Image (cartoon, rainbow, N blue to C red):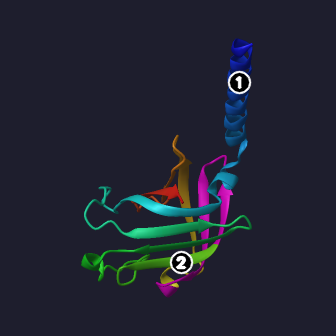
Amino acid sequence: MKTSCFVMLAFAVVLLTIFANTQAADKSDRDRLIGAWRLAAITGPDGKPVTDGLPVGMLIYTHDGHLSVQLMYPKSAAALSNEYVHNGYEASFGSYDINQATHILTHHVIGSNTGDLLVGKDLPRSYQFTASGDLLIKSARLDEHWSVRWQHY
């Protein structure tokens, strides 16, 4: 009797595991993208990993197609300014489209702390999900060499 209960329990566990893995595999990339992400790693425009002074950041994708991204660089980089960053802070929001076939995610910028440098622009990003569920994003522009790894909260 004990053996048959153990076999039934083991069988149930196997079935639940298969079901859970099938459910995760059935999710579209858009469904996997939805939610809040925290910055885990960043590679700078020179293609080298940022190890000293890693910014903190949050990226949010909503189910209805909106996004918001914010990164705050450490005090040592407070004067950093470029197309994306103003005085060590990066923030933009807008909408997005995702093309699962080409793995291109396009951010349509409505507002940004850098103003006209980004507002109204479409920013194509290539993306992929790692085996552990992290989100890797890099610019699809040939003149940009940065990449970012995000982890779900």
Q: Is residue 40 above or below residue 4?
A: below
Question: Residue 113: where, in percent of width, then height?
Answer: 48, 84
Question: Residue 67: where, in percent of width, then height?
Answer: 62, 70
Which numbered disc, 2 or 1, marks the residue that appears first in the sequence? Answer: 1
Quadrant of residue 22 within the rendered picture: top right
Q: Is residue 100 above or below residue 59?
A: above
Secondary structure of the residue carrying tag 2 is strand
Quadrant of residue 68 within the rendered picture: bottom right
Secondary structure of the residue carrying tag 1 is helix
* Residue at mark 2 to residue at mark 1: CA–CA distance: 50 Å
Dot label at residue 67: none
Q: Name the residue rendered at 74%, 67% in the picture.
A: 64
- Looking at the magenta stretch, what is its main secondary structure? strand
Left or right of residue 49, residue 22 in this image: right
The local crowd at label 2, few if under 14, some if 14 to 19, many if 20 or more residues have their Cα within 10 Å, is many
Disc 2: which residue:
92
In the rendered image, the quadrant that contains the N terminus is: top right
Question: Of discs 2 and 1, which sits in the foreground?
Answer: 1
In the rendered image, the quadrant that contains the C terminus is: bottom right
Q: Nearer the viewer, residue 39 or 121?
A: 39
Q: Name the residue rendered at 63%, 56% in the picture.
A: 33
Q: Nearer the viewer, residue 34 or 109?
A: 34
Disc 1: which residue:
9
Question: Residue 24: where, in percent of width, then height?
Answer: 67, 42
The local crowd at label 1, few if under 14, some if 14 to 19, many if 20 or more residues have their Cα within 10 Å, is few
Q: Name the residue rendered at 35%, 80% in the picture.
A: 88
Q: Is residue 119 above or below residue 134?
A: below
Left or right of residue 141, residue 27 in this image: right
Indicate the amino acid at tag 1.
Answer: Leu
Q: Which residues are magenta?
A: 95-115
Indicate the amino acid at tag 2.
Answer: Ser
